[in-house]
Image: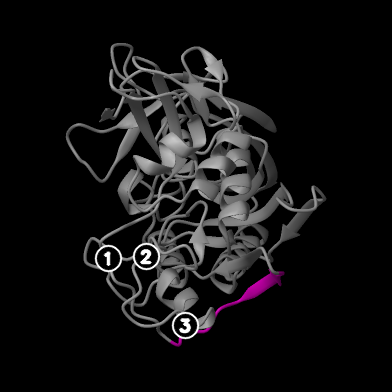
Amino acid sequence: MQVQFPTDIDLQDRELELDEEQGMFEHFRMVVDQGQSPLRIDKFMASHMEDTSRHRVQLAIKEGYVKLGDKTAKANMIVRPGDVIRFIMPYRRRGMEILPQDIPLDIVYEDEDLLVVNKPAGMVVHPGHGNFDGTLVNALAFYLGIPEGTDAGDGHMGILVHRIDKDTSGLLVVAKNDEAQLGLAGQFFKHTIERCYNAIVWGDLKDDEGTVDAPIERDPNDRLRFRVAREDGNGKNAVTHYKVLKRYGFVTFVECRLETGRTHQIRVHMSHIGHPLFNDQRYGGSEIRKGTVYAKYKQFIANCFEMCPRQALHARTLGFEHPSTGKWMQFSSELPADMTGLLERWDRFTNNNRTYEE
C-alpha cells in the first residue's frame, strides 16, 4: 500500500488546498496493495494511518473528505486491490510538545464543543518559527488543563481550526474535539463561514463598494510575503468584498468580507489595488502613501504609527453553523483601543483640515 501527497485532486468539485486560513488540510492518496483482502474503507484507512483513529476517519468520510475512485466514499464501502483512495484531513501539528502557560484569554463564548476567542494583536497563534511560547496554543493548553509535554496533535488539545496573523486582532474559533474540528474545518473549506474584518487603508477609495477577485501565490523572492499571482503562476482563487465605512481623505475605514480565506488575503488584495493597510510593514503600508509634504503632517503620521504599531486590521465578525446542533452562531468583537484611537485621531485631523493639500 502506498501513501502519497497528491498534486492534483478534485474532491466534491473543489480544489484541495493547504492554506493557513482554510483549516490547514493535509492531502493524501492511497493505492490499495494487490494482496489486500476486501475490507471496509474506514477500517482500511484507520489501520494504515498513524495517529488517526477509526472514529476520526469515519468523521472525515461523513464530512465528504474521502473519495474511493471517482465516488464520494461511505464508511461501509469495500476497498479491493488496486483501488485508489484520495482524501484530506484537517492538519494536526505533530512532534512539538506544548508548554501550558497561564496567559489571559478573552473568551467570547464556550460550550462543550468549541471556544470563540478574541485574540489581541501581537499574539502568535501557533508555536514555531522562533515563537515557542507565549502563543494562543500555549494559553489554550493551560486553560483546558492539558498536561505539560502533551503533543500538539493530541486529540484532547484545543484544536485551532483557522488562524489570523500575529499582528491582526480579533475572533478565532477553537474546536475542543474531533467532531467539532472536522465539522468546522469543512465549513472553512466550503467557504460557508462568515468572516468580516475592519481595516484602515491608505488613500481614498474610488467606489463605496467593490470586489477584488485575484488569485494569490507565495512571493518567490520573499517566503514571508504573498502576492497576486502572475498569469503563469500557481495562484489560489481569492475573493475579497470591501465596503467603505468612513472616508478621511488620506485614509479610509473599510469593512472586508472574505469569500475565501487565503494567507494575508486582505493585506495582499488591498495593496494590489493601491490601498495597503495602514502601517502594514510587509505590504507597503508603513510609509506615507497619501497626504501632504509638510513636516507637521509627517509628524502626525509618525504619531499614528506609534499609536497603532501594526497593520490596522481586526477580525470583527465570525459566523458559522454549530458542528453539533446545526444552529447558526454569529459573534462580534469591538475594535481594539489602538484602532479606535487611530480613528479618533483621523477624525480630529479631518475636522481641522477641511481642504486637503496633496
Q: Residue 267 carries which label?
A: none
Q: Which of 14 and 191 is in front in this view?
A: 14
Image position, residue 86 (x, y; %): 42, 24
Residue at 63%, 36% in the rendered image: 62
Query: Dot 2 lies on which element?
Result: loop
The reply to whether the C-beta atoms of the residues labelled 2 and 1 are less than 8 Å apart is yes
> Which residue matches tag 3?
142
Q: What residue type is labelled 1?
A: Met
> Which residue matches tag 1?
96
Residue 203 in sight in this render: no
Furthest-left residue in view? 221
Residue 334 shown left or right of residue 271 in the figure: right
Residue 288 shown left or right of residue 248 in the figure: left
Q: Nearer the viewer, residue 304 or 189?
A: 189
Image position, residue 341 (x, y; %): 59, 71
Q: Which amino acid does label 3 sit on?
A: Phe
Query: Dot 1 lies on which element?
Result: loop
Distance in Å between CA atoms under marks 2 and 1: 6 Å
Residue at 65%, 57% in the rendered image: 316
Does the magenta run of residues contain 104?
Answer: yes
Task: Give the magenta part as a residue range.
Answer: 102-111
Q: Which of marks 2 and 1 is nearer the N terminus?
A: 1
> Which residue matches tag 2?
152
The reply to whether the C-beta atoms of the residues labelled 2 and 3 are less than 8 Å apart is no
Image position, residue 32 (x, y; %): 33, 23
Q: What residue type is labelled 2?
A: Ala
Give the answer, above or below, for where 19 lies relative to 96: above
Q: Quadrant of the image for the N terminus?
A: top left
